[in-house]
Amino acid sequence: MFRFVFVIFLGLLLMTGQAEAQRRTSPPRKQLITPKKKAPVPAKPQAVAVKDTTKTQVADTTGAAPSVAVPNVAVPTAADTTMPSGISATGDTLTEAANEARLPVEKADSIHSYKITIEDISYLAVCPGTNVTIPFKTEGPFDEDNTFIAHIIDATGKSVPISLPVKKSPLKAVIPSYKVGGEVYRIQIISSIPVIKSQEVPLRLLQAPAAKIDLIDGTQTVRIMPGQEAHLRVNLTGAAPWSFRLSDSTTVLQTLSNPHYITVKPTDVKAYRVTGVSNACGSGSTSGEAIVNVNNNPEPKLELKEIEKIAKLCAGVPFQVPFNATGKYKEGNKFVVQIAERSGGAFKSISTPDSSGYITTQIPDSYKPGEYRLRVTSTAPYLVSQTTNISILSPTVATLQKDSLRLGENESGQLTVKFTGGGPWFVLLSDGTYENNIQESPHKIKVKPFYDTNYQISSAGGLCGVGKFSGSAKVTVKAPPASITLDKLPQNMVCAGSTIDIPYKTEGRYNPNNKFTVQMTDKSGRFVTLPTTVTPTAMQVKIAAAAPGDTSKIQKIRIVSSSPAVSSAIEELEVIAPDKAVAEVSGRGTVSAGRSTRIQLRFKNGLPPWSFTLSDGTTINGTFLNPYLISVSPASTTEYTISSLKSGCGTGTGRGSAVVTVEN
């Protein structure tokens, strides 16, 4: 018996050990942690065993109730605890992985990464009203709905858009036709999302042409011999090149010479006029007349004209020698320009012999700056004109002094430019500021920047053309903050639905896309925007219609701007419902012929002043009296009524009548 019991006990121990070994050696469930891709893929649920064979019963060797069944929990081994890179194996690894997947992507600070750069457009030469193409480059992650638009800025800082919005370079813009040719403007490109501005690039507009004709010496008439030539001069303004036509059908195409000289040889007296002139900007205006008289005076004569125009010359720069050769010269005659040092020395020819009497030449580079004499000679017969003194000048050198100015809003300052070489001089600064006919050095040039500006010289020169230039100056601008002042209202009582003018003033700077609007409180006290037309000094505002049942209400009114967002002080305005005015006429009386009496008008509704016309044509404009007594003097018995009535709220009606009886 004891042996049987021992065998049973040994069997139970073996079964218990086998179950425990099975529990310990069953593979644990692994939690896979994978990097997050586009979207997390939910893991498939593990298959659930049909029968839980991992539960064990503790033998009831003490007589107590069986213990609760405990699920078999797999414990990971060292080989199963490998985690994705960057995740610690300590703690709740599932939670750490989830947190890692949800970390937001840090956005780079792009405050200074946006940039718009207009490419080189210095080659552009356009007229008002024409199209231009503006290439540009961008930097930064602009919004996909962002657009770019071009603005043109005049010398006062006024900016207007000149293109439609585009997504990318280049911009197609139209220069407004009302812009003045010959002036320098600035071009700027502005983005919408975010609002970024490019640099300002100068653009000089071409000027429409004009032509005036006279003789080479500036007079209107000249006398020549038959077969002799006369020299006409056409002074041109506007952008070169020019084309023009004379009254004798002479046509000159695409000339760059200004003034332009023309040689004519009429057989009889003839008047010459310019009948038309044009350039890249179209047709222009003409003026002047040159009359050439022809006679038979045989005595030749040679003289210089307009010598003041050749008093200062530059080596290597062509110039025209104005002179008159009248009388009869021999066949094969030639004219020559000669020069000599003023202190003495022989005259030397500096032009090729010319038979036309119209000579263009230049000072050889071998002649140094200094004082000289100039004359014209003829060969057949040999004649010598009078001698005139000339000065040969050196090229211009312009230097912008290194000034540092600090200006307030809308203030102007002065920069200093020094010149050497032959003047008068001209200078063009980098912001488009331009001055010419400068007579003194150093010269103060006025600037009025809108923003902080680093100034440089874009071009400078003098009598000898464009010279050398250098230097820079910095000007800073201190601008007050933007503010709106709503001036005193012209009236404190208005009619609902009417239009009124609201005066205002602004200070500071506003962005080009800024808009001003007028707001008024509604019946709930919330400010709502009213239809607004903005002018430089006032805003025309349409007052909202009155709510049903409202006859008079105090409303609050203000002006706001959008960029930057600024509001004026709040004012109060009494808004009256637009009830039609009613004028009631009353009165009875008897008068003798030629005598007068008074009748009465009483007004109801509407907004004073009231204006009315009686049936006899009597008209009263703008009275605030109520009731209103008016004297009448009828010639015969008359019944008076209202023909028309107006008030601050529009047209009204009349009723009642007054009868005045006239006794004979």
Image (tube, helix red, strand yellow):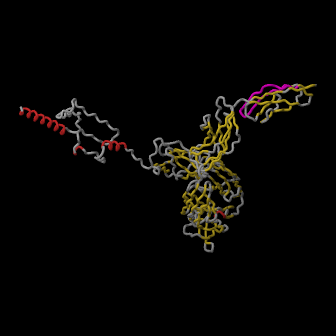
Q: Is residue 64 left or right of residue 613?
A: left
Which quarter of the picture shows residue 645?
Answer: top right
| Residue placed most toward the observer, 489 or 395 | 489
Front residue (pair 271, 115)? 115
Q: Position of residue 47 (x, y in %)?
A: 24, 32
Q: Quadrant of the C terminus?
A: top right
- From the viewer's side, name the closer residue of 550 and 219: 550
Q: Which residues are magenta?
A: 639-660
Q: Please say whether residue 416 is visible from this viewpoint.
A: yes
Residue under the image location 23 percent in, 33 percent down: 69
Q: Position of residue 477 (x, y in %)?
A: 58, 56
Q: Is residue 502 above or below residue 227?
A: above
| 378 relative to 598 in the view: left or right | left
Q: Residue at x 26, y 34 (%)?
A: 46
The part of the image, by quadrant, that contains residue 50 is top left
Labels in figure, total: 0
Q: Is residue 504 above or below residue 467?
A: above
Q: Is residue 355 visible?
A: no
At a point 59% along the width and 37% down the height, the residue shown is 526
- Out of 256 and 270, give the one closest to the viewer: 256
Q: Quadrant of the N terminus?
A: top left
Q: Inspect the magenta stretch and tell me whether residue 645 lies in it.
A: yes
* Residue 286, position as x, y percentages in the image: 66, 50
